[in-house]
Image (tube, rainbow, N blue to C red):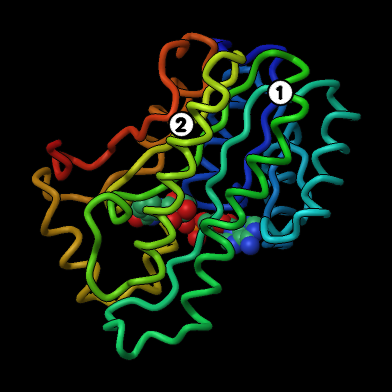
């Protein structure tokens, strides 16, 4: 199925994990994809594996560089239909707020929340010109429910959920949708650094009793960013093996 033929997508944080799976599925279904990330080696590997993906080394916290690289993509492909932001870091885990350093808190917020603000703002001019766009951010169930021991992460994802809801409404009449997903634990490298105790807590809360897969995330995301998804904006889709029940 070529749902994304003649469409152009930017995937931020797509060098590995969830973002990479989304990039690969979009390409498989016909999109021209450009991946933005800070992992130089992984980006080089990605273009080697998939020659139709272009890559840019960009830090989502660098607003000016983001804008420049978006212009490069528009020059190359002529348009921009989809932006998926999967960039994120976990920061400290299993760390009570009394031991949680302000500088760690600020770093997590800078990437997960300020970065999301930067990229949303930067893609909207082109999408507005086109009268069409699909923006999707990867939030987290932690942003809805809270997980203990990771104050920066849960605060950043709760903030991101607010951003999506607000901006979704701002652009509701423009042909541009702004949505998010709130996954429970998904099996990726990100969890390698999570304290086993925190991971155990999060997995135990999933009624299906297993971690989600990146392919499951990509399947949902690709529907949300497709032209078919016309009546959904400012919404957070759950992907939690039964954990979220509201
Ligand atoms: N894996 C999970 O259990 C899980 C659950 C819920 C939400 N999420 C969210 O999904 C997203 C993807 O996570 P993942 O599991 O694929 O992790 P990952 O670590 O494999 O991928 C995150 C990507 O973001 C990139 N990135 C980090 N900082 C960046 C920056 N400053 N600028 C640009 N790129 C940057 C990384 O280099 C990496 O490629 C994250 O936002 C994460 O919070 C993950």
Q: Do the residues labelled 1 and 2 touch (CB within 8 Å)?
A: no
Above or below: residue 119 compared with residue 96: above
Above or below: residue 147 compared with residue 163: below
Distance of label 1 from label 2 (alpha carbons) = 15 Å
Q: Which residue carries the number 2 mark?
A: 179
Above or below: residue 118 compared with residue 230: below
Q: Position of residue 95 (x, y in %)?
A: 30, 83
For image coordinates 14% across by 49% down, the residue present is 206
What is the quadrant of residue 135 in the picture?
Answer: top right
For image coordinates 54% across by 11% down, the residue present is 227
* Quadrant, the C terminus: top left
Q: Where is residue 55 in the image (x, y as percent from the top left)?
A: 76, 45
- Label 1: which secondary element: helix
For image coordinates 47% across by 46% down, the residue present is 18
Q: In this view, does 31 lie to the left or right of 159?
A: right
Q: Where is residue 111 in the image (x, y as percent from the top left)?
A: 57, 62
Q: Which residue carries the number 1 mark?
A: 127
- Label 2: which secondary element: strand
Q: Check disc 2: other Cα within 10 Å, few if <14, some if 14-19, many if 20+.
A: many
Classify mark 1 as within 8 Å of ligand 1 or not, answering yes or no: no
What is the quadrant of residue 240 in the picture?
Answer: top left
Q: Where is residue 8 in the image (x, y as percent from the top left)?
A: 71, 24
For image coordinates 57% across by 34% down, the residue present is 24
Q: Is residue 68 left or right of residue 218?
A: right
Point out which mark residue 35 bears: none
Q: Nearer the viewer, residue 234 or 6?
A: 234
What is the quadrant of residue 70 in the picture?
Answer: top right
Asked if residue 187 can be seen in this view, the reply is no
Upstream in sequence: badge 1 or badge 2 = 1
Above or below: residue 79 compared with residue 95: above
Q: Check disc 1: other Cα within 10 Å, few if <14, some if 14-19, many if 20+.
A: many
């Amino acid at each position: 199925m070529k749902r994304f033929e003649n469409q152009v997508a930017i995937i931020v944080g797509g060098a590995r994990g969830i973002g990479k799976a989304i990039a690969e599925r979009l390409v498989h279904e016909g999109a021209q994809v450009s991946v933005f990330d800070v992992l130089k080696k992984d980006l080089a590997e990605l273009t080697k594996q998939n020659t139709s993906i272009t890559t840019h080394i960009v830090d989502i916290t660098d607003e000016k560089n983001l804008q420049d690289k978006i212009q490069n993509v528009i020059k190359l492909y002529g348009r921009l239909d989809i932006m998926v932001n999967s960039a994120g870091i976990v920061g400290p885990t299993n760390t009570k707020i009394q031991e949680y350093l302000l500088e760690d808190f600020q770093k997590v917020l800078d990437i997960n929340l300020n970065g999301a603000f930067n990229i949303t703002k930067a893609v909207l001019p082109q999408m507005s010109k086109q009268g069409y766009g699909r923006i999707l951010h990867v939030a987290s169930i932690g942003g809805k429910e809270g997980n203990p021991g990771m104050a920066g992460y849960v605060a950043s994802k709760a903030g991101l959920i607010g951003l999506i809801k607000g901006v979704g409404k701002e652009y509701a009449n423009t042909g541009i949708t702004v949505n998010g997903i709130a996954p429970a634990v998904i099996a990726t490298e990100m969890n390698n650094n999570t304290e086993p105790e925190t991971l155990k807590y999060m997995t135990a809360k999933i009624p299906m009793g297993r971690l989600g897969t990146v392919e499951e995330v990509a399947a949902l995301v690709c529907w949300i960013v497709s032209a078919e998804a016309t009546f959904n904006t400012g919404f957070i889709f759950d992907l939690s093996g039964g954990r979220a029940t509201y």
